[in-house]
Image: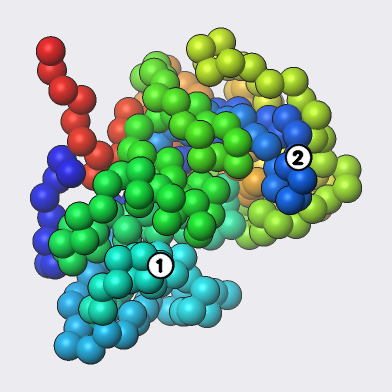
Amino acid sequence: MATELNWDSDWPAPAKINLFLHVIGRRADGYHLLQTVFRFIDINDYLRFSPRADDKIVLATDLPGTPAGQNLAVRAASALCATTGIRKGVTITIDKRLPMGGGLGGGSSDAATTLLALNQLWGAGLSSPALQTIGLGLGADVPVFIYGHNAFAEGVGEHLTHIAVPPAWYLVLVPGVSVPTAAIFSDPELCRDTPGIRPGDWRPGFGSNDLEAVACRLYPEVARHLQWLRQRADARMSGSGACCFAEFNDKASARAILAQLPAGMKGFVAQGIDRHPLAEKPRQH
C-alpha cells in the first residue's frame, strides 16, 4: 500500500463516477452483465478504526436509513474476519461526505477502505485479488476500489482492465433523493441488450448510461437535474443514480456552471484522479 496509515489515521474512501454504463445481457442467476468505465474523483468519505478489547465490530456512526448490521463497512469487517479466522474487534467511525444512493459508490468505497485498512491494521496479509473476492460478495462496485485504478469493468463489475482516462474536472449534481440500485435493475423496462465492446475500443465520450431512462421515470428529481445540466453541457447519470455529472477541461469552466445552479439544487466540482488514494503508485521504469 502506497500510504502507510495507522489506527489514528483518517482512511479515505473516494467516490467514483461511471463514464458510461451499458447493460449487455443477463446471467442465468439473474445478475446483469455490464460494461462500464469507473473513474475516481477527489471527494471522499473518511473512516477511522479503533481497536477493541473484545471481538465485536461496532459502528459508531448513525447513518439514517441503514441499520448498523447492514452497513457495508461493518459487513466488510465481518467478512474479513470470516475469511481469515481473525477474532478481533473494531469500532468504525465514518465521516460521511458522499451522498447515499447517489451512484457515486459511497457504501462500496467504505467497504473497500475497511478491507484495505483492516487487512493492514490486523496484519491479515491478504493480496489485492483476495480482498477483491471478498469485496465482490459485498457488492459489484467494491472490487474496483480495491483494485485501485481507473478501469474498464465487465461481468457484474468484477473483471477489471486498467484504462487511461484523460485529465478532467467534473460538475456533479446531487438530487435530493436516494435511488436504490435494486429498484432500477429489477424494472421490466430496463434496456438489457446493448452490444458490447472491447476495453481497448473505449474512447472518452463513448456510450451512455442504460439505467438513466428508468431512473428518470421513477425519480423525477433525477430527470430535472439531468435536464438542467444537459442544457449547458454533455451530461449523464452516474451508476444507478441519483447523481448526474458533466465533464470539463478545467476547474474554472466547471465552477462557472455550478454558479448558475438555481435555488434548491445542489452540486460540487471534483477533479478526476488516476488512482485510489490508498493504491500503490505505478513503478517507474
On the picture, is 53 further left or further right than 133? left
Q: Earlier in the sequence, mark 1 or mark 2?
A: 2
Q: Read off the residue under disc 2.
A: 26
The percent position of residue 26, horizontal first and vertical second, equals 75, 40
* Picture residue at 64% right of the left edge, 17% below the top: 197
The percent position of residue 166, horizontal first and vertical second, equals 39, 16
Q: Pointer 1 and pointer 2: residues touching (CB < 8 Å)?
A: no
On the picture, is 139 further left or further right than 14? right
- In this view, the residue farthest toward the bottom is 54
Quadrant of image for the C terminus: top left
The percent position of residue 9, horizontal first and vertical second, equals 15, 61
Q: Read off the residue under disc 1.
A: 79
Visible residue check, residue 99: no
Query: Camera-side residue: 74 or 98?
Result: 74
Amino acid, disc 1:
Ala
* Picture residue at 71% right of the left edge, 57% below the top: 182
Q: Is residue 18 above or below residue 208?
A: below
Query: Camera-side residue: 68 or 159?
Result: 159
Q: Is residue 122 above or below residue 166?
A: below
Query: Camera-side residue: 78 or 220?
Result: 78
* Picture residue at 65% right of the left edge, 35% below the top: 34
Q: Label 2, secondary structure: give it.
A: strand
